[in-house]
Image: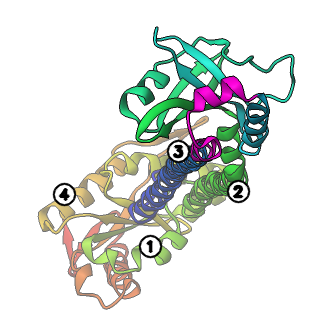
Amino acid sequence: MRVTRQFDLVLKIGIAIMTLLSLAMIYLYFQVDRVLDSTRREMTDMIVERYQMELGNAAKMIADRVGGSLLATLRTDKAKRSELQRLLRYFKTPEIENLFVVAKSEKGRYRYLLDSETDPQKRALFLQRFEPVSDVWDRTYGSGKKELHRHMENGRLWLTLTAPIVENGELVAVIGGDLSAKIRSDVEKRFTQIKTIMFGVAAVIVVMLVFGYIQIFYYFRGRSKSFVDPLTGAYNRKFLYEVLANGEYADYQIIMYDVDHFKRVNDSYGHDVGDEVLKLLTTRIGRLLREEDYLVRFGGEEFIVFLHTRDLSRVKEVALRIKKSIETSPLVIGDNILSLTISVGINAEAQKSPNIDAAIEKADEQLYCAKHAGRNRICFRGELLS
């Protein structure tokens, strides 16, 4: 049995709303993730800018401390070289793996001048050759400005920062430092909790949405079943008063029928056969109706057809077909052959009734007319149809 159009519409709207909420949450999660990625990049840039500034301060400190020719001073004054390397270590932080000063010789080769490494075994020697792995040093020499280079080494992100050391307006050396990917992970940690919370909230909402879908499915499946007569499969009075009574009956014409002498069937053949009669008749009449029509078991052997039409000739035609399908085709139930008839009453002006009870009452009056006329009749507006 099909779900009623009203509840089918509500179900579709509910599913649409839940789906939109699901999509909105997915969109929001990825939007937040994108914002976090953007924020991480911005914070990384801020940290890089901070270290570039620190390198600039270190470069200025070295120039100020020397007060003259950097290369000449470092060549002749070992104490000054040691002092500058010691001061250079103050600018080294856990994020900076290497911090050193190099200069380019007349032959274009780079040589170490200062190295902040504390381990003598690892520290570069004065004027030891330096082999750059990128052009960031050349770029600083060329531009006289701070430069940045990003590169991967053994699957790890490195940032090389450089700043010029200037004496009397002339670039004489370059200070540089290597920042490892740890800076990225530090920034990532700041948002781990936020992402975890967001993921948790999203997961809870998704679970709630899935639970909501399941609830909607079972609710409307149970709701639909509650509108169906368990014996015949026709709609029941609950459907009649909870759905059709809400004004929709006005779009239908009412055909009310009753199985003639049905008590005799129960008395002669038993209630099991009587039940089978009602089921077979419901199936037979249901085949004569369209999807938009409704067949309702009003009580006992009394049924109502709600025909979705305003065409009076169609109402009469369907009523005649229903009556003829019963009287011309006996029912075979086990070893029993039952010839049955029905009495039919028509109310083709249901829209004029103030409520569904009034509309059904007028159809019932016509049904009484058909029975009073000898049964196996159709009565409409107090007259019999042939």
Left or right placement of residue 124 versus residue 24 in this view: right
Towards the viewer: 361 or 145: 145
- The residues bearing labels 2 and 4 have C-alpha atoms spaced at a distance of 67 Å
Mark 1 crowdedness (10 Å alpha carbons): few <14, some 14-19, many ≥20: some
**Marks 3, 4: nearer the viewer:** 3
Under mark 1, the amino acid is Val
The residue beneath circle 4 is 317
Q: Secondary structure at mark 3?
A: helix
Instruction: Report the residue marked by disc 2.
Output: 197
How would you classify the magenta stretch by its main secondary structure? helix
Q: Position of residue 239 (x, y in %)?
A: 50, 69
Of residues 202 and 183, which is closer to you in this image? 183
When asked about the image quadrant of residue 120, the answer is top right
| Disc on the earlier residue, 3 or 4 | 3
* Numbered badge on residue 335: none
Sequence order check, earlier mark of 3 and 2: 3
Which residue corresponds to mark 1?
Answer: 243
Residue at mark 3: 41
Does residue 59 show up magenta in the picture? yes
Type of the residue with mark 3: Arg
Q: CA distance from mark 3 to mark 1?
A: 58 Å
